Amino acid sequence: MDANKLNVLRDINYTINYTCDNCVSSVFKPESDWGVCTENSYDHLKHGNTRFLSVYRYGSCPEYKKDITKIHLGTFREFFV
Ligand code: SF4
């Protein structure tokens, strides 16, 4: 990575946060920011069945568990928190 770019990223305290996107429990279609969490479900009021919880790719919860196979950061890895 360009040394000056790296310095600016460090200077601004840049961070890449954990999100549903890189959690072991998430399933997303590549073209959508909406998917499901297989760790949490709910009983759908209207249809009366149990469904996995809908989640947004850039959301998160305290049950997060990192899935390294979903993280492709290259030299930006040091900014992942
Ligand atoms: S961060 Fe929480 S809500 Fe999101 S996929 Fe993981 S367990 Fe589910």
Image: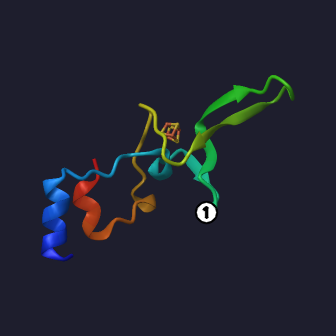
In the image, farthest residue toward the right: 47
Q: Position of residue 41 (x, y in %)?
A: 66, 31
- Residue at image coords 87%, 29%: 47
Quarter of the picture containing the N terminus is bottom left
Q: Position of residue 46 (x, y in %)?
A: 85, 25
Q: Position of residue 39 (x, y in %)?
A: 57, 36
Q: Nearer the viewer, residue 60 or 37?
A: 60
Q: Seen in the image, is 48 located left or right of residue 76?
A: right
Residue that numbered label 1 is attached to = 30
Q: Seen in the image, is 45 located left or right of residue 80?
A: right
- Residue at image coords 39%, 66%: 72
- Residue at image coords 27%, 64%: 76
- Residue at image coords 27%, 50%: 15
Indicate the amino acid at tag 1: Pro
Q: Seen in the image, is 16 located left or right of residue 8?
A: right
Quadrant of the rendered structure where residue 28 is? bottom right
Q: Dot 1: few (<14), some (14–19), or many (≥20) neighbours within 10 Å? A: few
Q: Position of residue 68 (x, y in %)?
A: 39, 57
Q: Secondary structure at mark 1?
A: loop
Q: Nearer the viewer, residue 8 or 80?
A: 8
